Amino acid sequence: MAQIEPGKVVPISAQLFDNNENAKVSVRVMIPDGTAVLDASLQSKQNGLYVFDGFLMPDEPFIICQYIVDGKSLEGEEYEIGQDVFLRDDSLGADQFIEIINERLPDKSDYFVGKIIEEAGDDFMEGVIQ
């Protein structure tokens, strides 16, 4: 299950097993109480991949994306209903981190845990703090 920050685009996509590029694929997005917050059609990209990129993650613990394909596959079989679950990413975003730093700028004695992306010398390091 992918984690998505509230307000960021949810990568809604479905792949048809038979690579059908002419199916009608739709998605219903539901929040935890079962309320549908979106019903939309997915666009065919290529090789049976269908995408919808116009939905932003709400401030909910998770969402469920239920995929429905109308009609039969190229082999004449019924398509199954699929689903994805996306979790809200509760980790600090960059803007939240900046707010914390602005309260008190760190000094050399501060201890951070993270991954260094670039070390530029002169006690300057750029990285990701977890």
Image (tube, rainbow, N blue to C red):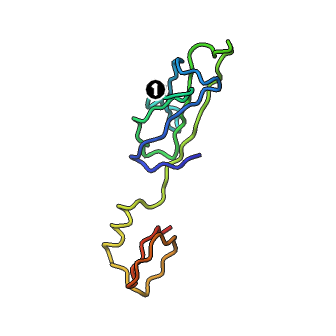
Q: Residue at x 58, y 21 (%)?
A: 20
Q: Is residue 110 left or right of residue 75?
A: left
Residue 82 is left or right of residue 129, and the answer is right
> Height in image: 10 above or below 106?
above
The residue nearer to you, when weighing 36 against 41, is 41
Residue 114 lies, in percent from the top left, at 51, 71
Residue at image coords 44%, 31% = 37
Q: Can you give x and y, in whole percent of width and height, for residue 130 in the image?
A: 50, 67
Q: Is residue 50 above or below residue 87?
A: above
What residue occupies the far bottom of the structure in this picture?
A: 109
Q: Residue at x 50, y 27 (%)?
A: 27
Task: Work out whether residue 6 or residue 114 is closer to the camera in this orientation and state it.
Answer: 114
Q: Total number of numbered labels?
A: 1
Is disc 1 placed on a helix, strand or loop? strand
Q: Quadrant of residue 80?
A: top right
Q: Nearer the viewer, residue 66 or 30?
A: 66
